[in-house]
Amino acid sequence: MKRALIVILIVFSVFTVGCKSTIGEDTAKDNDNQVADSSIIENQDEKDKTENTFKEAEDKAKENEKQDEAEAPVSKYSISDYIGINANEKYNYSGENSEYAEYFRYVEYIEGDKFQIRTNNGATETVMVLEGTDNELKIVFRRGVCDYRENFLKKPSNESEVLLKAPIKKGTEWKLSDGAKRYISSIDTVVSTSIGEFQCVEVTTENVSGQKDLKYYAPNIGLVKEVNDTENMKVISTLSSIEKDVRFNQVIRFYSPDENAEYMKYEDVTISFATNDITRLTLQNRFEEYGMLKGNVEINSLYLNDDGMVYLDVTKNFVPEMANGTAGEYFAIYDLVNTIGRYYGVNNVYMTLDGGNYESGHIVKYKGESFAVDLSRVQ
């Protein structure tokens, strides 16, 4: 009995010691876990504090930037001062890193707050109509590959691209139709050119991919310089000269019959246009010099229509004055049709007499019927 009691006591002692040991280990582990958890929490708190500090600094920087922009000085010049468009002036630009960076601009028409400008880079002639108001300068019409001269000031707008916007101060920003943003990045950047230094407004255009193009406008001059990022290269155009009291010259091929009225010959004639000259009247005067119009025959209207035909309306006395027999009438018509069609780059000319259909003793054209350019008898 005593031996059994001793065994029981030994077993109980071992069990008690073992339990104490296990409890101690578990307590130590719990303490370690608590320390680890506390460390994680402290680290997370530090991270959160750091992130909050950075965010607060970032927010503060943005706020300061907005405040700086709000307090940025405003240019003493207005939008109209930066247009710099005057009658009979030609602006020449030198180019870098592209053969097409060199070009010239000429003011074709001015009426009220609208201006029509022709740009020629040696390969393509483009016409733009600009509109300048107290609030903005923008392109309201554009026609590319336009070798002929026509007044587009009253044409319906086909574009609305803001070039410069008020207030003229750093930070003024606006969106373009393609998603790009355009903003005034400086109002006092000095641009050096071969004709002097100009203090300019710098306008940055940043597209959706981050590419930036720059334009510089000077008061009473207009566009002085532009820098375009393209294919990892900066294409630069810089104002190199301003020609005053000049004319815009075009070479137009005039067609006329030979002395025996057997075939048609041609001559390339240089025509000079001043700002606001009416194209049809200028051509009419030269046609009279070359005998293509005579006897007080006048051109009532002349324009390229949206259907791809040139519309030419002349006075009714064209037939009795010009249509001398079948051959005479042919040459009288095709002197005009070939000359005008080729000038506008079209194949058909819709010719009418005082608004009515063309009709003579030899030829009758019904409404909508045109004369096709015919160079088959040209030698």
Image: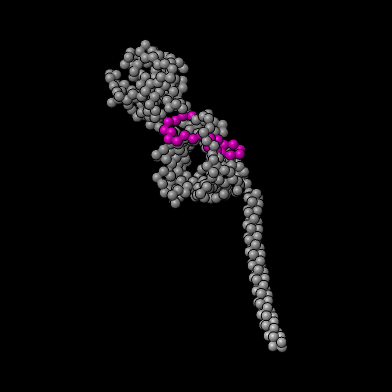
The vertical placement of 372 against 18, above or below, is above
Residue displayed at 54% across by 37% down: 160
Using the rendered image of the protein, determine whether residue 200 is visible from the camera's viewpoint.
no
Pinpoint residue 181: horizontal percent, then vertical percent: 55, 45
Residue 164 visible to an observer of this rendering:
yes
Residue 124 quadrant: top left
* Residue depicted at 47% across the width and 44% down the height: 239
Q: Give the left or right position of residue 261, taking residue 161 as reference.
A: left
Q: Where in the figure is residue 270, as x and y percent of width and height?
A: 38, 30
Q: Quadrant of residue 83?
A: top right
Q: Is residue 72 above or below residue 278?
A: below
Residue drawn where x is 41% and y is 43% of the image: 100
- 88, above or below 323, in the image: below
User: Where is residue 72 shown, x and y percent of the image?
Assistant: 63, 50
- Per the rendered image, the range of residues in magenta is 130-151
**In this image, 88 relative to 7: left or right?**
left
Residue 142 belongs to magenta span: yes
Scheme of image coloration:
one colour
Return the residue found at the far top.
361
Residue 217 position within the rendered picture, expressed as x and y whole percent measured from the top left:
53, 44
| Identity of the residue drawn at 38% across and 12% down | 360
